[in-house]
Image (cartoon, rainbow, N blue to C red):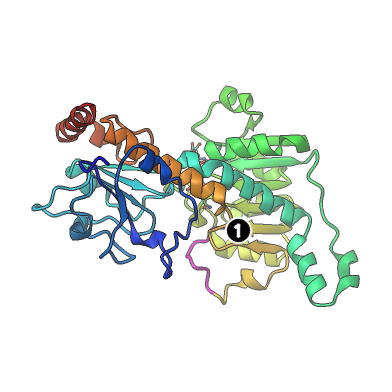
């Protein structure tokens, strides 16, 4: 065992019985590299306090926030904080950068499971699977004639945001021979075409697509991008799927559009405020499928996120800059470069 590089895991990975709630997250890669690892003992679920991560060179974490209180002038901070997941809104990146700590995320672990989830939600919506399940359970078998589904083959599908998840989604949906439209101001027509999509304006996408899938990053520009105006542009028979981030869709406007039959249905894994309030009008709607920001939680996601985070930790252990860095400016800081160079020397020794 290499006692000179210790890896800590945030305690939210464990349930009350001490079982890793995510299942197999690929920890054997740390064993194979001879790196000792342990679950952090004292940490509460909300925050990573400096005292708890003291003595660790790398911390793999999922839920806890990283704040100023995660650092102390008396304690050498870890070299890497590896987030299990893609969001870092609860991580004070500036505080990490000032301490020469690199923060990584795991977009390569999430892209396939999220893309597959979007397809699962779309098909469930089109085939009315949730309603049909309820018909059987409530003895309303004969009502099935009221719930004719909509086939996906040859339809027009529009993705808002054409990044990693949307690219995988375009590949997964290809056997249905759809026309795939994409709206993404940061992509070129040529690069979208290489992945089977036509780059169009937002309005053209909304007015043409039978299914609109929200797959963009949440930014000030995409906040409420799908508002009342956007929803009014959609075809009456069209459906909306959001697996990206809740605030991209104006939820009140969406509820109204669904209630009025201006669009045919929606499948939502994410919401403006999570958890979704139990008195939300969305809850009573038969043409809506809901998931608690967990539709992509599968063994594939666990292993993908874990392996990605552990790859980042092993990179840093070897003295290499990791791939998916959330605070990229840290890579240029003399203090971080010195810490990384020292690591490279110790690993080579
Ligand atoms: N539901 C989940 O559990 C889950 C899991 C992982 C990721 N996500 C979310 O899925 C989304 C996609 O993730 P990804 O890994 O593909 O990210 P990504 O960064 O690869 O892609 C995001 C895309 O959004 C585009 N974009 C930025 N501004 C835009 C704008 N104004 N209009 C349209 N597009 C714009 C970017 O150019 C980029 O191509 C993100 O919002 C991410 O947070 C959700």
Picture quarter containing residue 181? top right
Q: Which residues are magenta?
A: 269-277
Please check the rendered image and state whether residue 275 is part of the magenta-colored stretch, yes or no. yes
Q: In the rendering, at what x and y percent does residue 134 appear?
A: 76, 71
Which residue is painted at 70% across and 47% down in the image?
211
Query: Which residue in the protein does label 1 denote?
Result: 268
Residue furthest to the left in view is 74
Task: Please count the marks in the image.
Answer: 1
Is residue 177 found left or right of 293 in the rendered image?
right
Which residue appears at 62% of the width and 65% of the height? 255
134 sits to left or right of 277: right
Q: Which of 162/82 is in front?
A: 82
Residue 177 horizontal side relative to residue 166, left or right: right
Magenta region includes residue 117 = no
> Quadrant of residue 279 in the image?
bottom right
On screen, residue 230 above or below 134: above
In the rendered image, the quadrant that contains the C terminus is: top left
Viewer can see residue 67: yes
Q: How many C-alpha atoms fall within 10 Å of the one at disc 1: few (<14), some, or many (≥20)? A: many
> Going by the image, does 315 lie left or right of 292?
left
């Amino acid at each position: 065992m290499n006692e000179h590089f210790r890896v800590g895991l945030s305690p939210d990975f464990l349930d009350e019985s001490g079982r890793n709630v995510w299942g197999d997250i690929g920890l054997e890669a740390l064993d194979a590299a001879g790196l000792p690892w342990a679950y952090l003992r004292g940490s509460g679920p909300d925050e990573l306090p400096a005292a708890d991560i003291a003595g660790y060179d790398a911390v793999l974490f999922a839920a806890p926030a990283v704040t100023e209180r995660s650092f102390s002038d008396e304690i050498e901070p870890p070299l890497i904080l590896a987030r299990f997941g893609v969001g870092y809104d609860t991580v004070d990146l500036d505080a990490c950068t000032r301490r020469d700590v690199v923060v990584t995320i795991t977009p390569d672990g999430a892209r396939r499971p999220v893309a597959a989830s979007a397809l699962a939600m779309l098909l469930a919506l089109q085939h009315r699977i949730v309603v049909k399940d309820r018909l059987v359970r409530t003895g309303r078998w004969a009502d099935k004639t009221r719930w004719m589904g909509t086939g996906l083959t040859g339809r027009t599908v529009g993705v808002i945001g054409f990044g990693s998840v949307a690219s995988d989604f375009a590949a997964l949906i290809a056997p249905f021979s759809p026309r795939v439209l994409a709206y993404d101001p940061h992509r070129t027509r040529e690069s979208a075409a290489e992945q089977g999509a036509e780059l169009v304006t937002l309005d053209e996408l909304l007015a043409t697509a039978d299914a609109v899938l929200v797959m963009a990053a949440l930014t000030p520009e995409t906040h409420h991008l799908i508002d009342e105006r956007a929803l009014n542009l959609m075809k009456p028979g069209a459906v909306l799927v959001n697996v990206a981030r809740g605030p991209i869709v104006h939820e009140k406007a969406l509820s109204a559009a669904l209630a009025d039959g201006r669009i045919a249905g929606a499948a939502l894994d994410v919401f403006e405020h999570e958890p979704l309030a139990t008195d939300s009008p969305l809850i009573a709607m038969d043409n809506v499928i809901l998931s608690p920001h967990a539709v992509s939680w599968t063994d594939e996601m666990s292993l993908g996120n874990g392996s990605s985070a552990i790859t980042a930790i092993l990179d840093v252990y070897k003295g290499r800059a990791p791939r998916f860095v959330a605070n990229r400016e840290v890579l240029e800081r003399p203090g971080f470069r010195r810490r990384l160079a020292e690591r490279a020397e110790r690993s080579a020794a």
